Image (spheres, rainbow, N blue to C red):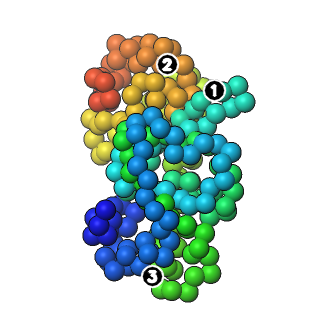
Amino acid sequence: MKNLCLAELPFFQGLSKEAVEKIVDSLSVGQMEYHKGQFLLQAGETVRAAGLVLSGEVHILREDFWGNRSLVTDIPQGYLFAETYAMLQMPAEMSVQAVCDTKVLYLQVHRIVNAEDPILVQFSHRLMQNFARRNLTLTRKITHITGRTTREKLLSYLSLQAQEAGSAMFSIPFNRQQLADYLAVERSAMSAELSRMKKDGLIDYHKNRFRLCLQE
C-alpha cells in the first residue's frame, strides 16, 4: 500500500505523507495478509509489534481456562491492535482473529521510547491518544456488561450506539453471536430478549440495523 493511502487511514489522519513515510520506514517490520477466520495472534504469544489494520477487520477475543470465548472489541480498518503488549514486549492475554480477509502492517512501537526525532515524537502522541481511546472503549464495555439483566445490557449498548451515530437509526458492527459474545450473554436468551423489546415498542431491527423507539 502506498504511503499516500496510509496517510488517509484514521490512525494517521492529520500527518503529512512525509511524516507517515518516516514512521513506516523507522518502525515497520512488514505486512501480512490473513484469510477470514484466521488467527493473527494467539493468547500466550509474545508480541513484538503492534498491528495496523490496512484493510478488513479483526476481533479481539479472550478465552478462559475452559475455552469459553468472549469478544472484547472489534478493530476496523485504519486502527491499531496489540499496541500495549507490543510496547511492553510481553505475551498477549488475548487472541486476534480476522473477521474477513485482512491486511496488516506491523509496527515496532516500543522503538519510540525516548525518541527525539520530532516525527516519532508526534507518532508517540498519536499512540497515547490511541491508548486513551482503547481505555474508553473498554470502560464503555464494562458499563454494558455490568447491567443486571440481558435487557439492561442491550439497552446500554444500543443507547450508546445511537448516541455515537447521532440518530435513533444505526447499524452495529456485530452479528447476533458476536453481540452475545460482546455482552457476555447467551445468544438464544439475547435473541428472545430482543424480540420482547421489539414487542414492547422499545426497538425495531432487521439484522444489524436498529432503530430506538420513543415510548408514548
134 left or right of 3 in image: right
Residue under numbered circle 1: 68
In which quarter of the view is residue 11 placed? Answer: bottom left
Q: Residues within 10 Å of mark 3 (few under 14, many from 20)?
A: some
Q: Secondary structure at mark 1?
A: loop
Q: Which one is earlier in the sequence, the residue at label 1 or at label 3? A: 1
Q: Mark on residue 119?
A: 3
Q: Secondary structure at mark 3?
A: helix
- Residue 167 % position (x, y): 27, 41
Q: State which mark lies toward you, 2 or 3.
A: 3
Cα–Cα gap, marks 2 and 3: 47 Å
Q: Which one is earlier in the sequence, the residue at label 1 or at label 2? A: 1
153 left or right of 102 in image: right
Q: Secondary structure at mark 2?
A: helix
| Residue 29 in sight here | yes
24 or 215, nearer to the observer: 24
Cα–Cα gap, marks 1 and 2: 14 Å
- Residue 85 % position (x, y): 63, 56
Amino acid marked by disc 1: Asn
Q: Residue at x 31, y 24 (%)?
A: 207
Q: Residue at x 56, y 54 (%)?
A: 82
Q: Residues within 10 Å of mark 1 (few under 14, many from 20)?
A: few
| Residue 200 in sight here | no
Q: State which mark lies toward you, 1 or 2.
A: 1
Cα–Cα gap, marks 1 and 3: 43 Å
Q: Residue at x 27, y 35 (%)?
A: 169
107 left or right of 20 in image: right
* Callouts 2 and 3 close, C-beta under 8 Å: no
Q: Mark on residue 187?
A: 2
Q: Is residue 47 above or below residue 65?
A: below
